[in-house]
Image (cartoon, rainbow, N blue to C red):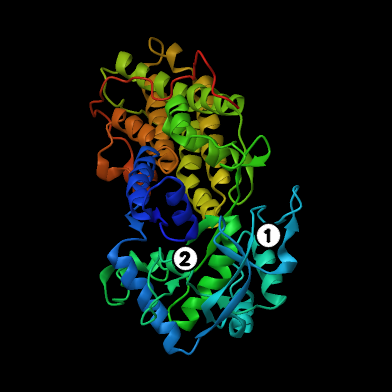
Amino acid sequence: FLTGTDEHGIKMLQTARKLGKEPRALADEMTPKFKEMVRRLGCSNDDFIRTTEPRHHAASQAIWRRMAAKGDIYLATYAGWYSVRDEAYYDESELAVGEDGAKVSPQGTPVEWVEEDSYFFRLSAYRDRLLALYEDNPHFIRPASRRNEVISFVRAGLRDLSMSRTTFDWGIRVPDSPGHVIYVWVDALTNYLTALGFPDESSIRYQRFWPADLHVIGKDIVRFHAVYWPAFLMSADLALPHTVFGHGFLLNKGAKMSKSTGNVLDPLAMADDYGVDPLRYFFLREVPFGQDGSYSHDAIVNRINADLANDFGNLAQRCLSMIAKNCQGRVPMPADLRAVDKSLLRRTDDLLEEVRATMADYAIHSYLEAVWKMVGEANAYFASQAPWALKTSEPERMATVLYVTAEVVRQLAILAQPAMPSACATLLDQLGIAPQARDFAALGDAGRLTAGAALPAPHGVFPRYRATQPAEA
């Protein structure tokens, strides 16, 4: 799992100059903030790549040399439209006219006419190979809407791609060509290989993790990942990633967030307000992966209070509180299971296969819907069996209902961990589950709760949202 900061390019250079700083100084100032954001949001990345690192310079120059050795790079002059904000070249046919009458890119960003000496990559020579790739591997580009966009773009014909810049020097040097720096997207894409030790293809990481299973990217950079990147890899005789998934945008009041329009949100402020795990849960549950999604304060609060506090949190708290009060704080010993007990346990045991099917299709919202459907079934079971009414009349039955409910909560907490790692870890602590018994291999019979095991005093894991001043929607 890789993330990082793309620190080269004319956009970075211009921003630094406006601030009266050197680009490296600006990168050194900003990168720790991104690292802290990744940490605060509970991301489990294995590496963090800075494109200014020496290891990345070596990898980028190595892939350049391999493409050049293939005869796919040549020197010429580039004349055309370029978007500094997108760090992308555009054909005249792709441009539109903005409100001020100036030409803009398909993303609505300003473009400028550029003329300079440049090395080019023979992208046009890879049209047929790319189309064959998409045809033979229908899941190479996901979702289908992105795949169709890319196929249409490639079928229309490809022009050779400008691969170097000479009007500035903030970038990775082209091997053996003073005055040229490598086009920032060649540099940026190569980071996937850098983290694995490339150009050392014998490294343990490279052998284990390349080709990548999945590139998760924004839909606005699908062209770079699904057209340019596979062509570069083909030229360099390197294996291609299995899937490129272009996710949608998070919209604010129906519009794409942009610093230029002033409608950006601070993810850390939102995490402080709602909590990291509830915020993760909301976006993963609310927005089908691959589509654009909007958010509102009311929608987030509803998910927190209804799904987390009322449904899952209340179920766990009521069950564990009854165990603490009526079973000496130990996992109760179940008596003979009735049909209703066996049915709930069986459906919970079978949930993993349903979850795996949804995740194989990258339907993260469907995975969480399946888990919360079982939360609903467990709540219905608990209410119908009414263990609070059985303490005196049927204490063995009370113990059985509490055991079955606690076991279901255990499995649901394990299944919900990818979305809410911190909260689910706390809940599993309260169930006395050892750290090594919290993966999917422990689901079902393999990890059943041990009757008689002592449990810590329970406390609420999913509190209701309350704020004196609601976050801005």
Image quarter of the C terminus: top right
Pick the front one: 94 or 224: 94
Please give the name of the residue rendered at 26% of the width and 70% of the height, measured from the top-left corner: 204
* Residue 147 vertical position relative to residue 351 in the rendered view, above or below: below
Question: Looking at the image, can residue 140 be seen?
Answer: no
Please give the name of the residue rendered at 62% of the width and 82% of the height, measured from the top-left corner: 124
Total marks shown come to 2
Q: Secondary structure at mark 2?
A: helix
Cα–Cα span, label 2 and label 1: 27 Å
Residue type at mark 1?
Answer: Ser
* Circle 2 crowding by C-alpha within 10 Å: few under 14, some 14–19, many from 20: many
Pick the front one: 306 or 163: 163
Which residue in the structure is indicated by mark 1?
Answer: 145
Question: Looking at the image, can residue 270 be seen?
Answer: yes
User: Percent from the top left, x then y, of residue 461?
Assistant: 39, 25
| Corner quadrant of residue 145 | bottom right
Please give the name of the residue rendered at 33% of the width and 50% of the height, measured from the top-left corner: 25
Please give the name of the residue rendered at 26% of the width and 73% of the height, measured from the top-left corner: 203
User: Percent from the top left, x then y, of residue 385?
Assistant: 50, 21
Q: Give the label on residue 71, or none.
A: none
Residue type at mark 2?
Answer: Val
Pick the front one: 41 or 86: 86
